[in-house]
Image (tube, rainbow, N blue to C red):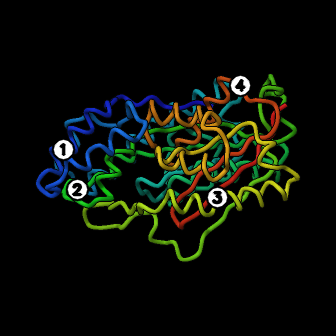
C-alpha cells in the first residue's frame, strides 16, 4: 500500500484567507460563515498546484489536461513503488482497477498507464469513474471480486483525485464555499491478490482478508452530491443534509450487512472510514453508538491531508497497515454520489 505526498501543501488558515478574498464580493456575511474552515478538523491539505495557481482563471480544457498529465505522473510512481515493495513485476499484474472522478480521458487513464509503463498488454482493465468519495471502497470490492475469480490474480488498485483542479473561479455558490474548505488532492495504490499468490506478499498474519462487500444506491437522492458539468468545468453539488442522511440510513444498512455475515456492530474492531468532514464523522459515531476514538485514523488523515474524495479511505487503510489492525473484524465504509454507500468487511488475525 503506497500513497502520494503532493508537491504543495496548504495550511487551513491559508485556505480560509483565500476564501475570504474570493467570496467577499458575493457573500456580504462572509465573516459569519468563514468559521466553517475552523470546524473541519483539517490542519493542512494536499494540493497538486501552488497556491497562486488557484486565483487565476483556467479553462476546463486546461484543467483537464493538467489532471491527465499529473495523474499519469503520480500513478506511474505509485505503481512502480508498490510493485517494488511487494516483489511483483509488471508482467505479474493480471488486473488493473482504476478509480477517479475529478477529470476525464478516453482512452481512460488505465489504458494510458499501461501504454506508458508497458504493463502486461493482457491486463484486465476496469476504469471506475463517477463514484466520488465512494470510489475507494468500491475499488477494493471490485479488486477482491477479480482476485476471488482467479486464484492467480495480482490486482492493482489505483486511485487518484485532483479535486483542487475542479475549482471554478466564478462559482460563488455555497456548495463551492464548503468544497473550498474541505477538498484536496491525493493518489494511492495497493495490491489485492488471489489465494495462490498471497504467500508472496510475506507476513500474511499482519494483513487482513476481505470477507464480503456491499453496494447500495438510495433512490431519489440524485441531488445530494455530484457534479453539474458546465462549460467552465465540474460545478460541485454538495447538500447540507449529508450528515442527517447518514444518521438516518447508515446504522440499519451496516447492521443488515454484518448480520448477513454473522457479525454484530459490537464485533467490529477496526473502522476504516472515509471521513467526509467533521460532521460526517460525528454522524458515524452517533448513528453507530461507538466511541469517537474508533475513528482516530480517519480523523488523523483528514487533519493532515483534507478530503481527497475516493482516495482518502485508502490513506486511512494505510494508517491501519502502519499502526496495526486489532484482531477481529473491520469495516471499510464510504459514501458518494447517487446517493450511495460502499461497504467492505475485513477480518484480521
Q: Which residue is mark 1?
A: 20
| Above or below 306: residue 149 | below
**First in sequence: mark 4 or mark 2?**
2
Number of labelled discs?
4
Of marks 3 and 2, which one's residue comes earlier in the chain?
2
Q: Kindly report which numbered mark, 1 or 4, lies closer to the viewer in this rendering.
A: 1
* Quarter where residue 158 is shown: top right
- Is residue 65 visible in the rendered structure shown here? no
Q: Which residue is mark 3?
A: 250
CA gap, disc 2 and disc 1: 23 Å
Give x and y (percent) for residue 85.
65, 23
Q: Nearer the viewer, mark 4 or mark 2?
A: 4
Residue at position x 35%, y 67% in the image: 229
The disc, 4 or 3, on the residue closer to the chain's N-terminal end is: 3
Q: Say the numbered circle drawn on residue 324.
A: 4
SS state under label 4: loop
Q: For this rendering, which residue is in front, 294 or 225?
A: 294
Distance from disc 3 to disc 2, alpha carbons, whole Å, reads 38 Å
Residue named by callout 2 = 59
Quadrant of the rendered image containing residue 205: top right
Q: Which mark is residue 263?
A: none
Residue under the point 53% across and 32% down: 3
Residue at mark 1 to residue at mark 3: CA–CA distance: 35 Å
Report crowding for label 2: few under 14, some 14 to 19, many 20 or more residues within 10 A (C-alpha): few
Amino acid at each position: 500500500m503506497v500513497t502520494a505526498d503532493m508537491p504543495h501543501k496548504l495550511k487551513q488558515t491559508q485556505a480560509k484567507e483565500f476564501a475570504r478574498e474570493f467570496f467577499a464580493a458575493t457573500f456580504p456575511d462572509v465573516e459569519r460563515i468563514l468559521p466553517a474552515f475552523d470546524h473541519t478538523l483539517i490542519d493542512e491539505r494536499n494540493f497538486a498546484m501552488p497556491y497562486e495557481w488557484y486565483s487565476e482563471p483556467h479553462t476546463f480544457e486546461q484543467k483537464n489536461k493538467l489532471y491527465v498529465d499529473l495523474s499519469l505522473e503520480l500513478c506511474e510512481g505509485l505503481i512502480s513503488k508498490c510493485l517494488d515493495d511487494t516483489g511483483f513485476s509488471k508482467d505479474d499484474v493480471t488486473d488493473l482497477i482504476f478509480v477517479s472522478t475529478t477529470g476525464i480521458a478516453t482512452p481512460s487513464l488505465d489504458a494510458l498507464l499501461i501504454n506508458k509503463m508497458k504493463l502486461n498488454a493482457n491486463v484486465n482493465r476496469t476504469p471506475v469513474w463517477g463514484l466520488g468519495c465512494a470510489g475507494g471502497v468500491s475499488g477494493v470490492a471490485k479488486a477482491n471480486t477479480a482476485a476471488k475469480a482467479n486464484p492467480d490474480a495480482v490486482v492493482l488498485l489505483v486511485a487518484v483525485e485532483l479535486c483542487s483542479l475542479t475549482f471554478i473561479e466564478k462559482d460563488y455558490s455555497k456548495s463551492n464555499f464548503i468544497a473550498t474548505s474541505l477538498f484536496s488532492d491525493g493518489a494511492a495504490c495497493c495490491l489485492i491478490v488471489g489465494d495462490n499468490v498471497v504467500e508472496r506478499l510475506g507476513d500474511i498474519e499482519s494483513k487482513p482478508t476481505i470477507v464480503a462487500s456491499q453496494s447500495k444506491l438510495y433512490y431519489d437522492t440524485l441531488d445530494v452530491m455530484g457534479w453539474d458539468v458546465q462549460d467552465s468545468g465540474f460545478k460541485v453539488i454538495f447538500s447540507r443534509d449529508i450528515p442527517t442522511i447518514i444518521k438516518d440510513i447508515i446504522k440499519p444498512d451496516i447492521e443488515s450487512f454484518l448480520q448477513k455475515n454473522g457479525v454484530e456492530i459490537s464485533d467490529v474492531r477496526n473502522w476504516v472510514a472515509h471521513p467526509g468532514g467533521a460532521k460526517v464523522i460525528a454522524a458515524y459515531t452517533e448513528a453507530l453508538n461507538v466511541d469517537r476514538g474508533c475513528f482516530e485514523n480517519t480523523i488523523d488523515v483528514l487533519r493532515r491531508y483534507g478530503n481527497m474524495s475516493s482516495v482518502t479511505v485508502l490513506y486511512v487503510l494505510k494508517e491501519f497497515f502502519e499502526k496495526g489492525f486489532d484482531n477481529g473484524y473491520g469495516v471499510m465504509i464510504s459514501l458518494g454520489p447517487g446517493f450511495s454507500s460502499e461497504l467492505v468487511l475485513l477480518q484480521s488475525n
